């Protein structure tokens, strides 16, 4: 079945480790996302130290699954790479979604944890990981082999579609 519909937020994981090779494939998918003027303003921080994953749960109130996750990837936007001002958020969103789809194709489970624009999360994670000022922690993707199963999505809503005009 199409990866898009199979993708669900998976928040329970087994203790099976995620290999470096698979992580690189996931990040490669992120790096192949579309970006404004192909500016690719992103960096990816692989977080696999248990101490750091546990620390993030104290900064981010909805990240308790990180206690179980084998690894998380922090997607960051680098303002110095911006050719088209303000688009970094959309670029990093596209990268995050691409990663989530690759996670499904790799037989893993993941969930998008929103960081930006919540100032406390951005600054807390910046301090914890030593992220420089021109780089903004944008999203965290928790990753692990799934220990829960969810039904594919079916969210089509005809009433949200309009033709040509708002009417
Ligand atoms: C911008 C954004 C921020 C999110 N932040 C969190 C979060 O902090 N914690 C969490 O458990 N899920 C988070 N999610 C996942 C959503 O809760 C989830 O995508 C939504 O409920 C739909 O479920 P599904 O992903 O299984 O389709 C976030 C998703 C997005 C797109």
Image: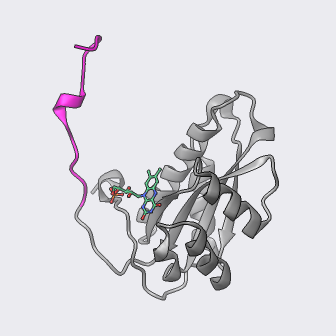
Residue positioned most to the front = 120
- The answer to which quarter of the image holds residue 110 is bottom left
Relative height, residue 112 to residue 88 (above, below): below
Nearer to me, 2 or 68: 68
Q: Main secondary structure of the magenta part?
A: loop
Q: Would residue 105 appear left or right of 122 to someone viewing this image?
A: left
Q: Residue at x 55, y 74 (%)?
A: 57
Question: Please, is residue 42 above or below residue 11 in the view?
Answer: above
Q: Position of residue 159 (x, y in %)?
A: 18, 29
User: Which residue sits at x=61%, y=77%?
Assistant: 53
Q: Find ligand 1 in the image and state its quadrant.
A: bottom left
Residue furthest bottom as drawn: 15
- The reply, left or right, for residue 15 in relation to residue 79 is left
Residue 161 on the magenta span: yes
Relative to 50, does residue 131 appear above or below in the rendering? above
The C terminus is located in which quarter? Answer: top left
Q: Position of residue 28 (x, y in %)?
A: 62, 56
Q: Nearer the viewer, residue 167 or 93?
A: 167
Q: Is residue 85 above or below residue 2?
A: above
Q: Nearer the viewer, residue 105 or 164?
A: 164
Q: How is the image coloured?
A: one colour
Residue 27 lies in what quarter of the image?
bottom right
Residue 102: tell me if it is visible. Answer: no
- Identify the residue at horizontal 25%, vertical 54% (top origin): 153
Residue 104 placed where, x, y %? Answer: 41, 64
Q: Magenta part of the protein: which range? A: 152-167
Task: Tell me if residue 165 is in the magenta stretch.
Answer: yes
Which quadrant: the N terminus?
bottom left
The reply to whether residue 10 is in sight is yes
Task: Please state if 59 lies on the left or on the right of 63 as rendered.
Answer: right
Q: Measuring 52% from the left and 76% from the top, which residue is drawn there?
A: 66
């Amino acid at each position: 079945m199409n990866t898009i519909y199979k993708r669900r937020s998976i928040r329970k994981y087994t203790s099976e480790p995620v290999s470096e090779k698979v992580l690189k494939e996931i990040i490669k998918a992120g790096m192949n996302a579309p970006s404004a003027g192909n500016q690719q303003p992103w960096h990816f921080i692989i977080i696999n130290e248990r101490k750091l994953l546990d620390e993030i749960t104290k900064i981010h109130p909805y990240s308790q699954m990180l206690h179980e996750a084998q690894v998380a990837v922090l997607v960051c936007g680098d303002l110095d790479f911006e050719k088209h001002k303000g688009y970094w958020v959309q670029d990093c969103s596209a990268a995050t979604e691409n990663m989530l789809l690759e996670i499904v194709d790799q037989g893993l489970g993941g969930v998008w944890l929103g960081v930006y624009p919540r100032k406390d999360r951005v600054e807390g994670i910046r301090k914890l990981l030593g992220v420089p000022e021109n780089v903004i922690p944008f999203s965290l993707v928790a990753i692990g082999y799934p220990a829960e199963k969810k039904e594919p999505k079916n969210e089509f809503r005809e009433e949200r579609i309009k033709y040509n005009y708002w009417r």
